[in-house]
Amino acid sequence: MIPLAIFLALFVWSRSRLALVAAFLWALYVPYELAMKHRILCSGECNIRVDLLAIYPALILMPVLAAVTAVLASRG
């Protein structure tokens, strides 16, 4: 939830749409991960999580782009 709050604050500060998209991605990821933890979406062995190979790059790339564009937008 901390990244979600950070990117919402970044959106309010800079009005960067990418910051809002990054916050939205984290808002989608938190319930998904909680459902995996409580074995709602995972029945049985969830030790090898191939789904994270697709999710983590988006959760890393989008916030980096959002932070860069927000800083650039606030300077200009």
Image (cartoon, rainbow, N blue to C red):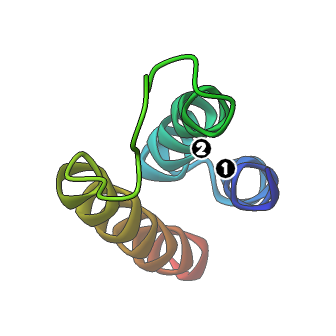
Residue where numbered disc 1 is placed: 11
Apparent side of residue 3 relative to residue 48 in the rendered image (left or right): right
* Residue 23: image tag: 2
Q: Position of residue 53 (x, y in %)?
A: 19, 60
Few, some or many residues within 10 Å of mark 1 (<14, 14–19, 20+): many
Q: Nearer the viewer, residue 7 or 57?
A: 57
Few, some or many residues within 10 Å of mark 2 (<14, 14–19, 20+): many
- Give the mark nearest the N terminus, 1 or 2: 1
Mark 1 or 2: in front is 2
Q: Nearer the viewer, residue 20 or 33?
A: 33
Apparent side of residue 4 relative to residue 64 in the rendered image (left or right): right
* Residue 69: image tag: none
Q: What residue do we see at 53% from left, 68% from top? A: 70
Q: Position of residue 29 (x, y in %)?
A: 53, 38
Based on the displayed image, in which of its 4 quarters is residue 23 positioned?
top right
Q: What residue do we see at 51% from left, 74% from top? A: 67
Q: Position of residue 20 (x, y in %)?
A: 55, 41
- At numbered mark 1, what does the secondary structure look like: helix, strand or loop? helix
Label 1 and label 2: CA atoms lie apart by 9 Å
Q: Position of residue 30 (x, y in %)?
A: 64, 38
Mark count: 2
Q: What residue do we see at 79% from left, 50% from top? A: 1
